[in-house]
Image (tube, rainbow, N blue to C red):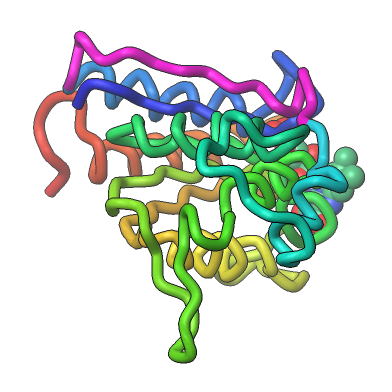
Amino acid sequence: MKNILHITASPRCEASFSARFSQQIVERLLARAPGAVVVRRDFGRIGLAHIDEAYGHTLAGSWPQAADAYEQPGSLAQSERLICELEAADAVVIGTPMHNYTVPSVLKAWIDHVLRAHRSFALSAAGKTGLLADRPVHIAVASGGGYTGDGARQPDFLTPYLKAVFETIGIHALHFYALQHTVRGGETVSAGLREVESLLDCRLPLGSACS
Ligand SMILES: Cc1cc2nc3c(=O)[nH]c(=O)nc-3n(C[C@H](O)[C@H](O)[C@H](O)COP(=O)(O)O)c2cc1C
């Protein structure tokens, strides 16, 4: 593994559980591939502009598409940069909070740039076909309440949404990790972190594999 793309989407900076917990995943990947380069995109902190008029018109077919996407106006060039960054990554790590049952809007903005018809997926009468090579994507989710398992008390649009998004572009190797009930703080969060740690010990062991 040569390149790891690490995306975080929480506005809470250093206090973010999903950012810290996704960093643990990056460290485990680096332990397996010490020379790997990590490209960090902290969209929760720096933001990401939404797609613009040129993007909307081009994808709607009302404006012609330039041969070189970097030559495109506005957010089409941004889209090209973000797709190239994703293509260059052998593994992707995403740290995201659950916001209103799904991903935060900044992560949705990244998705709108990366899922681009005729570039990252093809359209045909049979539907959409992914044009990117498969690669592992590790997704660390922090949620204030429970959304999966016995303690789930709310809908989960985040997990099926991200599955559909990545499958559209040809990426199927998704690994989800959930740190739930963060609003309870204290021992609940400590127990959740221990649970996540043991799941990571199984999936991305630092030393011996889990039993
Ligand atoms: C705008 C907003 C919406 C939220 N919506 C949900 C939600 O739908 N479900 C939930 O369990 N927690 C929700 N939360 C709580 C966050 O998921 C929780 O605080 C989580 O720890 C944030 O992740 P972070 O620590 O990485 O910032 C919401 C928080 C904010 C700020």
Q: Is 96 on the left-hand or right-hand side of 135? A: right
Q: Is 164 on the left-hand or right-hand side of 130? A: right
Q: Residue 165 sits in which quadrant?
A: bottom right
Residue nearer the viewer, 84 or 30: 84
The number of discs equals 0
Residue 47: image location, x then y, percent: 79, 26
Q: Residue 89 sits in which quadrant?
A: top left
Residue 74: image location, x then y, percent: 77, 33
Residue 38 counted in the magenta span? yes
Q: Is residue 122 visible?
A: yes
Q: Is 177 on the left-hand or right-hand side of 106? A: left
As drawn, the residue found furthest toward the bottom would be: 125
- Residue depicted at x 23% and y 21%: 2
As drawn, the residue found furthest toward the top would be: 35
User: Where does the N terminus fall, quadrant-wise?
Assistant: top left
- Residue depicted at x 27% and y 37%: 201
Residue 99 counted in the magenta span? no
Quadrant observed for ligand 1 in the rendered image: top right
Residue nearer the viewer, 68 or 210: 68
- Residue depicted at x 73% and y 19%: 15
Question: Which region of the structure is painted magenta?
Answer: 33-48
- Residue depicted at x 62% and y 33%: 18
Residue 3: image location, x then y, percent: 31, 23
Q: Is residue 187 visible?
A: no
Residue nearer the viewer, 176 or 74: 74
Residue 196: image location, x then y, percent: 44, 41
Q: In the figure, 143 relative to 75: above or below? A: below
